[in-house]
Amino acid sequence: TILTKHKNNLIEILGNDFLNLLTQTIKMVEEIDSSVVSVVKIPAIEDHEQTAFPEEYGCQIVYALRDSLEKLPKENIRNYLKVELKNTSSILRRIVLHVINIRYKEFRDLFWEYEGNPLIDAIAKHEQYELLKNHSKEFSSGEIQKILNWIEEIEPSKSFNAINEKEW
């Protein structure tokens, strides 16, 4: 697609303006038809064999936003990541978790300062799992304890959450 072909040039030339344009586009697409950027259509933020139609519009926009956040300087995106991690948009939260995973040394604090329990967010489970898997050896004993506390906080009385707790 044109977006795929010129994405790197757009990131380089437009920077944060491209980032903001993509974010607004994703929000508009979600309002019109949230299934276009759902976990069913986009099971993983990284390139993944389970993504059935990566050439579709929703995937292309998500991938362009992902790539922008992976490439732009940390000082240009820190506040963006902080804000979007709290967003009600599950696709934007998933993208942020993916970027924290990819650029963990720069943004680890954003994950550990998460308000609430991120493990309850079942839609972002893949991105959370990848982050924990890829960086578990870097965790301090306090961070490991925090993860254990998050797991224990999942209420086993609720069947969905009980399954969620067992998975973690």
Image (tube, grey):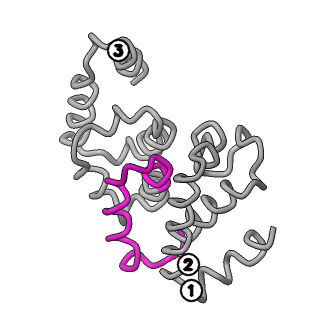
Residue 43 lies in what quarter of the image? top right
For the residue carrying disc 1, how many other residues have a C-alpha within 10 Å: few (<14), some (14-19), or many (20+)? few
Relative placement, left or right, of 86 versus 102 is: left
Query: 19 or 127: which is nearer to us?
Result: 19
Marks 3 and 1, how far apart in space? 45 Å
Counting from the top left corner in percent of width and height, residue 103 is at 45, 62
Which numbered disc, 3 or 1, marks the residue that appears first in the sequence?
Answer: 1
Q: Which mark is residue 14?
A: 1
Marks 3 and 2, how far apart in space? 41 Å
Marks 1 and 2, how far apart in space? 5 Å
**Secondary structure of residue under mark 1:** helix
Residue 71 falls inside the magenta stretch = yes
Counting from the top left corner in percent of width and height, residue 70 is at 53, 67
User: Which residues fall within the magenta stretch?
Assistant: 70-95
Counting from the top left corner in percent of width and height, residue 23 is at 50, 66
Position of 9 relative to 67 (above/below) = below
For the residue carrying disc 2, how many other residues have a C-alpha within 10 Å: few (<14), some (14-19), or many (20+)? some
Relative placement, left or right, of 149 versus 126 is: left
Q: Which mark is residue 162?
A: 3
**Secondary structure of residue under mark 3:** helix
Marks 2 and 1: in contact by CB < 8 Å? yes
Q: Which mark is residue 131?
A: none
Q: Amino acid at mark 3?
A: Ala
Position of 4 relative to 57 (above/below) = below
Q: Amino acid at mark 2?
A: Phe
Q: Residue at x 33, y 57 (%)?
A: 108
- Pick the quarter of the image with the C terminus: top left
Q: Residue at x 47, y 36 (%)?
A: 123
Mark 3 or mark 2: which is in front?
2
The residue that label 2 is drawn on is: 18
